[in-house]
Image (tube, rainbow, N blue to C red):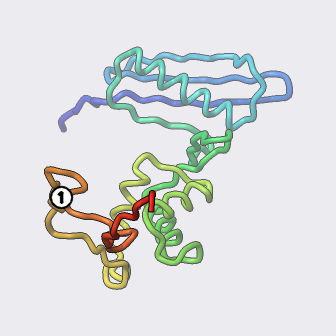
Amino acid sequence: MTYMEKNYWTMYFDGSSTETRYGARVVIESPQGQRWQFAFQLDFNCTNNQAEYESLIIGLEILKEMKATRVLVYGDSQLNELYRKGSYGLLLLCPSAEDIKVIMAESHKGICGAHQSVVKMRWLVRRHGYYWPTILKNCIEYAKGCIKCQIYGPIQRVLANALHPVTKPWPFRGWAVDIIGKIYERPLLDPLA
């Protein structure tokens, strides 16, 4: 039987909040089997989930200082949703890859929209409280892949070649305006007569 050395770090984290105290606990194990235990008292009021997040962040910062590149993370919390703070302080949910497909389908052709354009689709997704880093790219790909949009969408009426403007060497030479009509000559009247 051969023994293979593991090539990753392991981190266990836990956070706790009570009425008076808030804390975080992190245990880190190196690929060689060395273990370090850390306990932190948080100096701000927070919920249990926030304490869990803090312990996860603290542990990842410690691993970064230790120059760990591959990490296996274990936690006993219910941290299965990530949020990003959007404009006006709103929290936007960062969905999973499977949820992204459903969200885009609903915003493009589902109950939310009627084959919306890419910009409108992105606006709808963010308006309904979702965010992910490649939202615009994913919306473009989804709209390009929609068969109905490709068949029944507006036709772009763009010339195949660029326009070539012709400039005249003398402006106003090519046109004139006749406002008063034809001028007839009259005999001069003698003012002395």
Quarter-of-image position of residue 151: bottom left
28 is higher (above) or lower (below) than 85: above
Q: Nearer the viewer, residue 34 or 185?
A: 185
- Residue at 58% x, 50% y is 93
Label 1, secondary structure: give it.
Answer: loop
User: Residue 141, position in %: x, y?
Assistant: 33, 63
Residue at 34% across, 18% down: 67
Q: Amino acid at mark 1?
A: Pro
- Using residue 147 as the reference point, say whether residue 128 is left or right of it: right
**Residue at the disc numbered 1:** 165
Packing grade of label 1 (10 A; few <14, some 14-19, many >=20) is: few
- The one nearer the camera, 65 or 161, is 161
Left or right for 178, reference 38:
left
Task: In this rendered view, identify the residue nearer to me: 68 or 43.
Answer: 43
- Give residue 88's position: percent from left, percent from top: 67, 41
- Position of 171 with respect to 34 (left or right) is left
Task: State the residue at coordinates (36%, 76%).
Answer: 146
